[in-house]
């Protein structure tokens, strides 16, 4: 087993790997944040020192995604799971329906919460095939008067990812991008709202990013609790109450790291290279490794696969752990193996895993 904790190969699905450079900078600034004599965690969220951190994180996010002026960027708490409830509370009017594209467990959870507040329905579903594929665009059947259409852009448990997004016209498109936000350039203007828990590609757990178009804020239900209104947080620059200050600081530093790494185009290119190393090990194994996701729907963030029998699978995971590979166990609901190759997972880790897979096959094939 590797002795240096930073030498382990971290493939955890979330909370997941953070850039080493960001961790080292946070370590340097932890006790005395930029000459304040206090940790960032001790600063008032109303102080100029913290407000600069807060506003800079928003500005970096807007710049990296080229977010248009008619959008708000919010930092909320409660994880993406709270958004499952907040979205229908704010936007699912009594006289309308909401369409949900079912591509995995997180879609199911979002749909279940929406049922508490109105009439959601399935726009399309791949559940019968154990969510191994993303629906085709021509399979999406929804109504022009829908309150919104909801999808999950990347499915961590099953290893599938949307490559393109539907043009929904006047129907607001809402996306849970918790596990692939900031992994590639996207056209934000296609969406009425994007939300994401930070703990995969943006920073530590505890912060939820919401990118929301201003016009739908005006149409939201006013008769819900203050803290559950998006407008409350938009009007106060996400400072209505004490935000998760350390998490937002870390998020800003991760965004700075993305900028310094060449921006989203460079990040996307490396993510493709990383995933290819592992998918090639699967595809060239003559069935020794079996990928779960359909080739056209494969995720660049979560690579899911099985071995021919469970005993061999257990041996693979045990030997991988001994070799310093962390987090390769598949989700408890589907089993198997999963390598999560988020932005901060280095290319070297993916090369090492690919080589380990090949060597394991040679010894056990």
Image: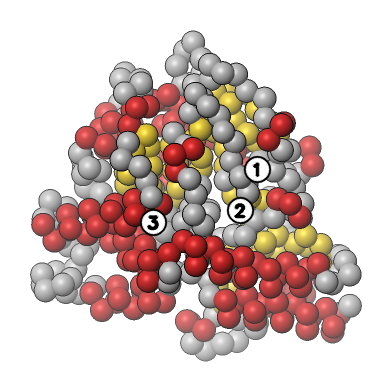
- In the rendered view, tell whether residue 343 sits above or below residue 221: below
Q: Is residue 158 visible?
A: no
Q: Secondary structure at mark 3?
A: helix
**Structural distance between the alpha carbons of marks 1 and 2:** 9 Å
Q: Secondary structure at mark 2?
A: loop
**Which residue appears at 54% of the width and 23% of the height?**
98
Figure quadrant of the C terminus: bottom right
Contact flag, marks 1 and 2 (Cβ < 8 Å): yes
Front position among marks 1 and 3:
3
**Which residue appears at 34% of the width and 51% of the height?**
62
For mark 1, does the 10 Å Cα neighbourhood hold few (<14), some (14 to 19), or many (20 or more) residues?
many
Q: Earlier in the sequence, mark 1 or mark 2?
A: 1
**Residue position marked by numbered label 1 in the rendering:** 104
Q: Nearer the viewer, residue 8 or 349?
A: 349
**Residue position marked by numbered label 2 in the rendering:** 156
**Which residue appears at 37% of the width and 34% of the height?**
213
Q: Position of residue 298 (x, y in %)?
A: 69, 55
Q: Which numbered tag is attached to residue 64?
A: 3
Q: Earlier in the sequence, mark 3 or mark 2?
A: 3
């Amino acid at each position: 087993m590797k002795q240096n904790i930073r030498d382990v190969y971290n493939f955890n699905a979330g909370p997941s790997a953070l850039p080493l450079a960001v961790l080292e900078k946070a370590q340097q600034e932890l006790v005395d944040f930029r000459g304040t004599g206090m940790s960032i965690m001790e600063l008032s969220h109303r102080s100029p020192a913290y407000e600069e951190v807060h506003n800079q994180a928003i500005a970096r996010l807007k710049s990296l995604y080229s977010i248009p002026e008619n959008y708000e960027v919010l930092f909320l708490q409660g994880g993406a799971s709270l958004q499952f409830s907040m979205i229908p509370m704010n936007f699912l009017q009594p006289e309308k329906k909401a369409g949900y594209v079912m591509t995995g467990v997180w879609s199911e959870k979002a749909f279940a919460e929406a049922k508490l507040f109105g009439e959601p329905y399935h726009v399309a579903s791949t559940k019968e095939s154990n969510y191994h594929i993303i629906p085709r665009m021509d399979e999406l059947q929804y109504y022009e008067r829908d309150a919104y259409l909801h999808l999950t852009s990347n499915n961590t448990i099953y290893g599938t990812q949307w490559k393109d997004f539907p043009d929904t016209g006047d129907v607001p498109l809402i996306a849970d991008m918790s596990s692939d936000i900031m992994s590639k350039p996207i056209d934000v203007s296609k969406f009425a709202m994007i939300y994401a828990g930070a703990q995969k590609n943006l920073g530590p757990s505890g912060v939820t990013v919401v990118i929301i178009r201003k016009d739908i804020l005006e149409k939201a239900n006013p008769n819900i609790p203050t803290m559950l209104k998006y407008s409350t947080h938009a009007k106060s620059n996400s400072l209505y109450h004490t935000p998760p200050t350390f998490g937002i600081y870390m998020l800003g530093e991760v965004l700075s790291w993305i900028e310094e790494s060449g921006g989203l185009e460079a990040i996307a290119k490396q993510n493709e290279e990383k995933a290819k190393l592992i998918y090639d090990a699967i595809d060239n194994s003559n069935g020794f490794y079996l990928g779960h996701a359909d080739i056209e729907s494969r995720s660049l963030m979560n690579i899911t696969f099985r071995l021919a029998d469970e005993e061999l699978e257990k041996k693979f995971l045990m030997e991988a752990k001994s070799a310093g590979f962390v987090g390769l166990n598949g989700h408890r609901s589907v089993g198997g193996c999963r390598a999560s190759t988020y932005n901060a997972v280095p290319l070297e880790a993916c090369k090492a895993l690919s080589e380990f897979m090949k060597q394991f096959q040679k010894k056990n094939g």
